[in-house]
Image (cartoon, grey):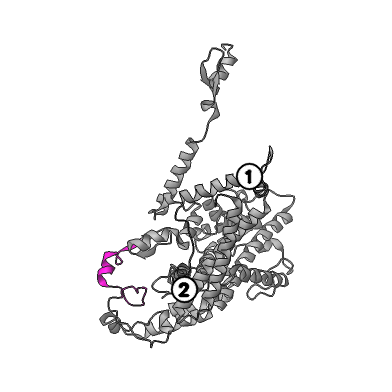
Amino acid sequence: MSSTLLEVTRSSHEEVERLERLVVKELQNEPASGRDRLLQSHRVRNMIDTIVSTTDKLVEIYEDKDNARKDEIAALGGQTTLGTNVFSAFYDRLKEIREYHRRHPAARVVDVNEEDGLLKEEPQIEFSGEEAFGRYLDLHELYNQYINSKFGEAIEYSSYLDVFSQPQKISRKLKNSRQYREYLENLLAYLTYFFQRTEPLQDLDRIFSKVESEFEEQWITGTIEGWENTVEDNGHDPAQLSLIDLDYYSSVEELVELGPERLKEGLAALGLKTGGTVQQRAERLFLTKHTPLQLLDKKHFAKPSRQPVQNGAAAASLHNENLKQVALMEAKIEKMCDLLDETIDRTKDNIVKKQALTYEEIEAEREEEETQAESESDDDEQQIYNPLKLPMGWDGKPIPYWLYKLHGLGQEFKCEICGNYSYWGRRAFERHFKEWRHQHGMRCLGIPNTKNFNEITSIEEAKDLWKRIQERQGVSKWRPDLEEEYEDKEGNIYNKKTYTDLQRQGLI
């Protein structure tokens, strides 16, 4: 039955209609708390994803590019290459149905009780202890990246929660670095991932599409806050846009962080040679900080070019495009912060409450923690006594201490690929290899995040393993000169190389 294309079509339509009924039934239930509302949204999101994937399969079947559906419909009428035989087609189909039920005696039949069970499932949603099931943001990793950067400043975590959503206040001269670009990428990735977990029914692609369209209009007119007059028609020499302000760099090592392409643009704008390693380019550019160009040795200058203005304009165009990508990420981050405005306010209040506690209170009792999202229900909010700071369970209460020791939640695992991020417990450590932070780190290294790299936390070990895998793949490739076989008139077998040599010598 299900082996036929028409039966697959019928069962797919049935599945879509069943899921649509479940979505309507689910949305008619009013959740009692914020936790229930989040679980309901994820259940609906999973059902919608299933409907979309099933519909895509139906569209592919109806397009019938291989004419399989057309042939099956013709076969139902008994049309074959030998003519029309209705009875033969009927008994063939009957035989197929009996064979299917013989192999599958317990064919799946969906009843009402099973549908009710689907509405009570609790989807698995990944939240850290700091996030408290989507109530608060956990920006500690990004905060450390901010205060240890050139564009950031040493401020308290509570103050960072006020400024991270306002990237336009950072000086534009400090944004032209790889460090700032990586910070924006990490911040946008986290906010996007958090929003997808807390608002699964929102269409994030449509939101970002609208942001990009508005951004393009404002970028052309030069009205984006913090990026005014960035386009090339602002009256300045385009080649000057690629110059690097050396006042913000105190050593060659800091210039190396800009990368080879940015150093090449800066050298080309000054008329200096652009070749060599990244270290050599940085050293050559750093010479110009304390030495005027007129006093530099001629060996540092590039040969005269017939099109210096065109080269400068091309470099400026590339530089302007990089700045545009940075500005677009800032616009997306501001939009995400607007959507998560209530969550940001709750996070600020929670941090202020924690900072109000004295050291003695924290060390002596560590008590009266705020309940999680289910406290929004009709039950009165109650404070939980948790002096050992045990993780919260599914019911919003601290897990038993024996369970905490059993799962080794006091054991710390650090991953260098994730920026030396700490994971507590073996389960969280094994699970993090599929999460966004580790995947982003592997992408930055240019290594695919496959099962071969599970348990690998060191950058050097990951690079060495990737190198060995590439070498192994190179050895396993088919080599026709050694593996392609030839046979002479006498039945002797040679590989291609040997056969060609013997034939060239006239021995065959």
2 or 1: mark nearer the eye: 1
Indicate which disc residue 297 carries: none
Disc with the residue nearer the chain's start (2 vs 1): 2
- Residue at the image position 48 percent from the left and 75 percent from the top: 38
- Residue at the image position 50 percent from the left and 70 percent from the top: 42
Q: Position of residue 351 (x, y in %)?
A: 41, 81
State the residue in front, 270 or 387.
387
- Residue at the image position 38 percent from the left and 81 percent from the top: 371
Q: Position of residue 352 (x, y in %)?
A: 41, 84
**Badge 2: few (under 14), some or many (20 or more) residues near its Cα, within 10 Å?**
many
Residue 369 seen: yes
Span highlighted in magenta in the image: 389-413
State the residue in front, 162 or 378.
378
Residue 459, located in which quarter of the rendered image? bottom left
Dot 2 falls on a residue whose secondary structure is helix
Q: Identify residue for label 2.
A: 39
**Badge 1: few (under 14), some or many (20 or more) residues near its Cα, within 10 Å?**
few
- Which amino acid is tagged 2? Leu
- Which amino acid is tagged 1? Phe
Q: Identify residue for label 1.
A: 87
- Does the magenta run of residues contain 205? no
Residue 269, located in which quarter of the rendered image? bottom right
